[in-house]
Image: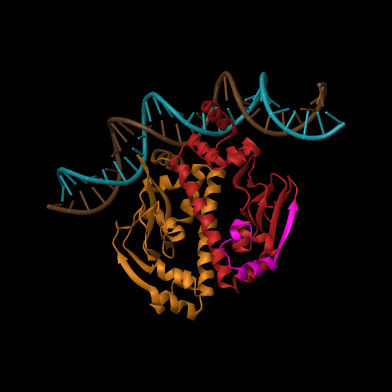
Chain colours: A orange, B red, C cyan, D brown
Amino acid sequence: MYSQLKNIEIFKPLSNEALEKLAAVSKRVEHQKGTILIYADKIEPYFYILESGIARAYSDGENQQITFWFGQSGAVLFSFNSYINNGPGYENIELLENCSLIQIRLTDLFSLYDQHLEIANWGRKIAEQELIATERRLIDRAFKGAAERYQDFLDQSPRLIKSVALKHIASYLGVTQVTLSRIRAAHK
Amino acid sequence: MYSQLKNIEIFKPLSNEALEKLAAVSKRVEHQKGTILIYADKIEPYFYILESGIARAYSDGENQQITFWFGQSGAVLFSFNSYINNGPGYENIELLENCSLIQIRLTDLFSLYDQHLEIANWGRKIAEQELIATERRLIDRAFKGAAERYQDFLDQSPRLIKSVALKHIASYLGVTQVTLSRIRAAHK
DNA sequence: GGCAACATTTTACAAATGTTAAAAAATGAA
DNA sequence: TTCATTTTTTAACATTTGTAAAATGTTGCC
């Protein structure tokens, strides 16, 4: 595993020694398009890093399904509430393509956090990067209209436009599919 | 400082030894209501823990000011982008009451993160808790109407209703002040 | 190809929220 | 208290977005 992790962006800041410790508890897994990797309301015992493919996180409402996260190659992928509070999650994670993932058992990861300073700080930075990205999205919702958020999405995630259903992008942007269609029609 | 930090919720998980190290770089400061503690577009060199009083974070738009965070006693308070990326922030933080705060220089905090395993994990958990709270808000925006978000706010932050201007609460909830007034009128 | 299933767009109408302006209420300082 | 300032509410109207349903487009499979 060591030589495989070396090439993944998120592991690059780590020393060889830390990487070896992570490699010892990492396993590569492959899953097909359509797989629900993580189910809401379950305590999910694994943490993943997406090596190739794309995924989305969504929650089910009464008569709607809201996608609130997309992950591409290099993304970390885990049930927030399992990872953070050891409780059942609120998100499902679906693979939108065949995916290759690095899988780490949470108990192994937590044990490394408690033993290894460098890995603890690596985990801290993962949470911090997710945090700042999430808050940016919350603020963008306030300052930018739906059309601008769509344009930003086009600019920043061209890869996703090709392979993600527009209904998922619509809910990610915080509008209905009808509104997104109108935005797209006006845009031409 | 040690005996003062001991009574603050966020420090309670820490061992005496870790707490002493943090106490050595902590300083208590007092600021008056109305103080802008953190300015957007500046690299902010301090991290704060709010001991008493309340604060809000906001960003300035062209013709509006959006409040996207409130802090009460026990909250951590820092410029996200300074803390995380050593870059200029996007938020101003204003004290809405006279406040007592614990102040820690970021360089001191980072140096402890790099030296002390327990403190590194403490910092990791701070980021994780902020992350899960922020994502919850993003998801609530999708699933709940403005009226329900207002009710949740009343239930969860009764302390804030008394002392925060409704215009700030309106933008925090993602609606205009006029809409919030309508919600309140309908609620009676 | 042709069918079935699913995704996307379009249309018409309804509901929610925004905008602007003014009135009413609350607040704070002299 | 009184006056000036600020905050909050209300009103009328405009705009955006949502809902439901039909029309069109796309995909994959036999």
Looking at the rendering, the stretch of residues picked out in magenta corresponds to B6-30
A181 vs B110, left or right, is left
Instruction: Report x, y in % for residue A104.
Output: 39, 69
B97 vs B181, left or right, is right
- In the rendered view, tell whether residue B145 sits above or below residue B22: above
Question: B116 or A16: nearer the eye?
Answer: B116
Farthest bottom residue? Answer: A17
**Residue B11 in magenta stretch:** yes
C18 vs A81, left or right, is right
Question: B53 or A23: nearer the eye?
Answer: B53
Instruction: Report x, y in % for residue B149.
Output: 50, 39
Q: Quadrant of residue A20?
A: bottom left
Question: A145 or A137: nearer the eye?
Answer: A137
Q: Quadrant of residue A182?
A: top left
**Residue A13 in magenta stretch:** no
Please give the name of the residue rendered at 60% of the width and 33% of the height, measured from the top-left corner: B177
**Number of numbered discs:** 0
Please give the name of the residue rendered at 60% of the width and 74% of the height, measured from the top-left corner: B115
Q: Is residue A177 visible?
A: yes
Q: Is residue A188 visible?
A: no
A62 vs A152, left or right, is left
- In the rendered view, tell whether residue A127 sits above or below residue B35: below
Q: Quadrant of the N terminus of chain A?
A: bottom left
